[in-house]
């Protein structure tokens, strides 16, 4: 729970009593490599805060081709948010690609925390805002940049992930072939 407090205090300040109030709303869960936290068609009851490990959020098209929307590492949040917030069936998958640990929280917990502790409402709003900005930047990059530019931006933003994620998955995330990524990587 120390990691949770440090993560929250990147945005809000907390007293010991406030943090004691927050702690029961989060449950730790260990994850194994290749374990799925969400599968397409699931009822999505949880969002996850990554404490350790690497995860990929992806979907499959009708032909079974995989499209990676997000990698999630330490201090990143993830879920199938449409399903989570709108009580719909999952259209995405979350798979653990490096064993780790997450904190699990429900929508009910999130709503209760936000309504009873205004600081948490601010925290969640800031996280959603920053996530939305990152998503817009990712879409913009995919639509209007070259593979070289996408690779350079990924390398600049996430240098640690280049060493932790298989090249095949990085290529998929960037929308290039494994061979193209190898050429970009060698430059």
Image: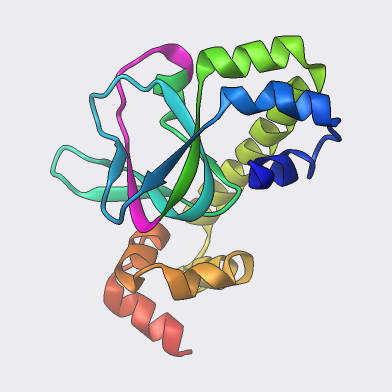
Q: Is residue 167 left or right of residue 132?
A: left
> Where 166 sits versus 56, above or below?
below
Which quarter of the figure has residue 23?
top right
Q: Is residue 86 magenta?
A: yes
- Residue at point 31% right, 49% down? 67
Is residue 45 visible to us here?
Answer: yes
Q: Nearer the viewer, residue 91 or 143?
A: 91
Farthest-out residue, bottom: 186
Side (left or right) of 52 relative to 88: right
Q: Position of residue 25 (x, y in %)?
A: 58, 23
Residue 98 image position (x, y, % from top left): 38, 60
Residues in magenta? 85-99
Give how far across and how far down residue 173 sits, in percent: 39, 58
Q: Quadrant of the N terminus?
A: top right
Residue 98 covered by magenta stretch = yes
Asked if 128 appears above or below 4 in the picture, the reply is above
Q: Would residue 149 be seen by someone viewing this image from the given angle?
A: no
Q: Extreme left residue here?
A: 63
Q: Residue at x 82, y 31 (%)?
A: 16
Q: Is residue 109 left or right of residue 178?
A: right
For residue 176, which quarter of the picture?
bottom left
**Which residue appears at 84% of the width and 32% of the height?**
14
User: Residue 50 versus residue 101: which sits nearer the camera?
Assistant: 101
């Amino acid at each position: 729970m120390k990691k949770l407090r440090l993560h929250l205090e990147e945005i809000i300040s907390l007293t010991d009593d406030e943090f004691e109030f927050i702690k029961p709303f989060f449950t730790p869960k260990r994850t194994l490599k290749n374990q799925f936290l969400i599968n397409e068609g699931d009822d999505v009851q949880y969002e996850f805060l990554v404490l350790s490990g690497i995860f990929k959020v992806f979907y499959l098209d009708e032909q079974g081709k995989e499209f990676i929307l997000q990698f999630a590492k330490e201090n990143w949040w993830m879920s199938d948010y449409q399903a989570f917030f709108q009580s719909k069936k999952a259209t995405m998958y979350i798979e653990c690609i490096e064993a780790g640990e997450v904190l699990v929280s429900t929508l009910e917990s999130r709503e209760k925390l936000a309504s009873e502790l205004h600081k948490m409402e601010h925290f969640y709003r800031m996280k959603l805002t920053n996530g939305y900005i990152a998503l817009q930047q990712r879409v913009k990059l995919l639509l209007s940049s070259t593979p070289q530019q996408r690779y350079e931006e990924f390398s600049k933003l996430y240098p640690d992930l280049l060493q932790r994620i298989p090249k095949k998955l990085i290529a998929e995330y960037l929308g290039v072939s494994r061979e193209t990524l190898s050429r970009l990587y060698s430059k």
